[in-house]
Image: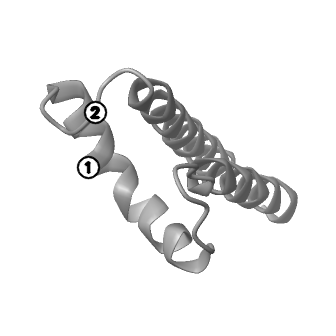
Amino acid sequence: MEFLIQTANIIIDLLILVIFLRMILSWFVRGNENVLNNFLIQCTEPILRPIRRLLPGTGPLDFSPMIAILLLEVIRNIINVLL
């Protein structure tokens, strides 16, 4: 059981890192012409797109990465408490 908890924590850590890297890189690179940026978009878009659909339009500000990170932390806490 401990192996599953550790694996879930590692996956959540990686997802948070990828989301954070995408946020930082979006300040400097536009579009997906950069290979790293394209990879980050492909990894995070399945997580961020549903959140964006639920959020009201905020113009140029995108709060979906912050909400995704918060949700991932909530999931981590639930996993650590229940298992």
Q: Which mark is residue 30?
A: 2
Q: Nearer the viewer, residue 42 or 78?
A: 42
> For the residue labelled by badge 1, is the local secondary structure a helix, a strand or a loop?
helix
Tell me the quarter of the image containing the N terminus. Answer: bottom right
Vertical side of 8 occupied by 38: above or below:
above
- Image spot of residue 9 (x, y percent): 63, 42
The residue positioned farthest toward the front in the image shown: 59
Question: Which of the two labelled residues, at mark 1 and mark 2, occupies the earlier sequence position?
Answer: 2
Vertical side of 53 occupied by 17: above or below:
above
- Image spot of residue 65 (x, y percent): 57, 49
Is residue 23 rendered to the left or right of residue 46?
right
Q: Nearer the viewer, residue 71 or 62?
A: 62
Q: Residue at x 16, y 26 (%)?
A: 34
Q: Residue at x 43, y 34 (%)?
A: 22
Toward which corner of the image does residue 39 lie, by quadrant?
top left
- Image spot of residue 12 (x, y percent): 58, 45
Asked whether the residues under the numbered discs 1 and 2 touch, taking CB atoms below 8 Å apart as contact, a structural biologist would say no
Q: Which residue is mark 1?
A: 42
